[in-house]
Amino acid sequence: MPDPLGDLLSNADSTAATEAASLVPASPTPFQTMENWASPVLSHPKQKPTNDTMRQTLKLLSVVAFAMTANLSLAQGVLTPPTPLAATTPGYTEGPIESIDLQLDGSVIMKVMGVTVNVPTNTIVNSPTRQLTLRQLANRTRLPGRTEPGFIGGTALVNGVVDIATQKFTATDMVVEPAENVLIGVVTSVAPLKILNSEIAFIDDARIPFHLINEFGFELAPNPTVEVGSLASAEGYYAGGKFQAFLLDLAGDLPLANPATDLNIQRAQVRERTPNARRGDEVKIRGFYHVPNGVTPTIRVFRVDAGVATLLGTAAAVSDLNPKFGVWDFDFVTPPTTNVVLGTAPTQLRVVITATDGTTATTTIEPDLIP
């Protein structure tokens, strides 16, 4: 029995191949780079495509699109339409903040690098050193040293989703900062404090609170004794003729805000692997520790599910040249299981340090789920 639709699809495939072969050269010309050789339109970056070439390209695209999306049902002899596109797609933008407008319902509409960003009330917004409310995000009070209102003129890094039909971009989480400036070197003056001869001012603003830490990430006691020539680094932004620091990192055995046994988490990641009955999930977490007695401690890692802690294992701990401090690391694959809870990647991790003198400390984190 004749099959006109089958012939049509076969001819479409043949036509697409013929048209593609006629438009793409067999080998690059002296003017074609590896980046643009595959393009039948741009044989040279500065060459303007002719109308005839553009018509051929559009014709080729229409033939290929038909051949790829048309699906013949032999039983019914009809064409099935292509699978509908997803309603949304992930979006991301990173650039200068042009405007931030608080709405009556508590949400925010921002303009970032020309992109309109809708910020619902449940969006997670962070400055470099704290989580912000949307009112703090939209607060137009000038940050120390700056002339622009609030975070205007700063930088936003926005994750979100795009509605394909309306092109509306909605934020899910973001980080905002006035600028991203860094100093790494030595203290060149104590009064006033300078690093590499750049004067340091401590930010006094609730939107970006100042933190003073040592090289292991532990909070230092206020007003430490700093010597010229000691290693130091600062993060913040340069404004008003000074380096406005929200983070100052000083090296050395300086007094801690919490002198007791302690630990922190610098990174925590998990990866889901399936099927759960045959493959365990990856867990990677690391950080630093402090023990006053200078003896390497025991550090255990637990997963926490609905308040129930399950031991995953013991981290490797290595002391620093200053034995009061050290690094710990835990790289683990969970046992395969059919258990509906333990068979999935952990959503919360708890880390417990126990020093040889019996003192302990605990910290928890929600790890990043990586693909």
Image (cartoon, grey):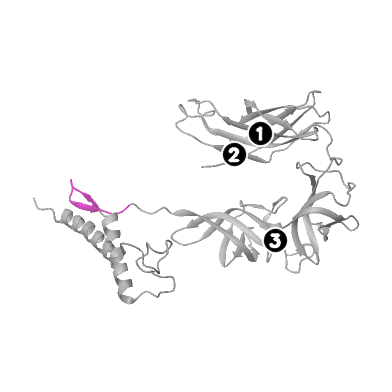
The amino acid beneath tag 1 is: Asp
Q: Secondary structure at mark 1?
A: strand
Mark 3 crowd level (few <14, some 14–19, many ≥20, 10 Å Cα): some
**Mark 2 residue crowding within 10 angstroms, few (<14) / some (14–19) / many (20+):** some
Q: Quarter-wise, where is residue 244 in the image? A: bottom right
The question of residue 77 being in magenta is answered with: yes
Cα separation between marks 2 and 1: 12 Å
Q: Residue at x 14, y 56 (%)?
A: 4
Residue 247 seen in this snapshot: no
Magenta stretch bounds: 71-82
Q: Is residue 296 left or right of residue 255?
A: left
Residue pointed to by mark 1: 329
Nearer to us in this view, 254 or 359: 254
Name the residue at the left extreme: 1
Return the residue at label 3. Answer: 179
Disc 3, SS: loop
Q: Secondary structure at mark 2?
A: strand
Query: Per the image, is 366 magenta?
Result: no
Three-letter amino acid code at disc 3?
Answer: Ala
Residues under labels 3 and 1: Cα distance? 32 Å
Number of numbered discs: 3
Classify 165 as above or below 370: below
| Residue picked out by circle 2 | 269
- Dot 3 or dot 2, earlier in sequence: 3
In this view, the mark in front (3 or 1)? 1
Left or right of residue 311: residue 143: right
Question: Is residue 283 depicted above or below 18 in this figure?
Answer: above
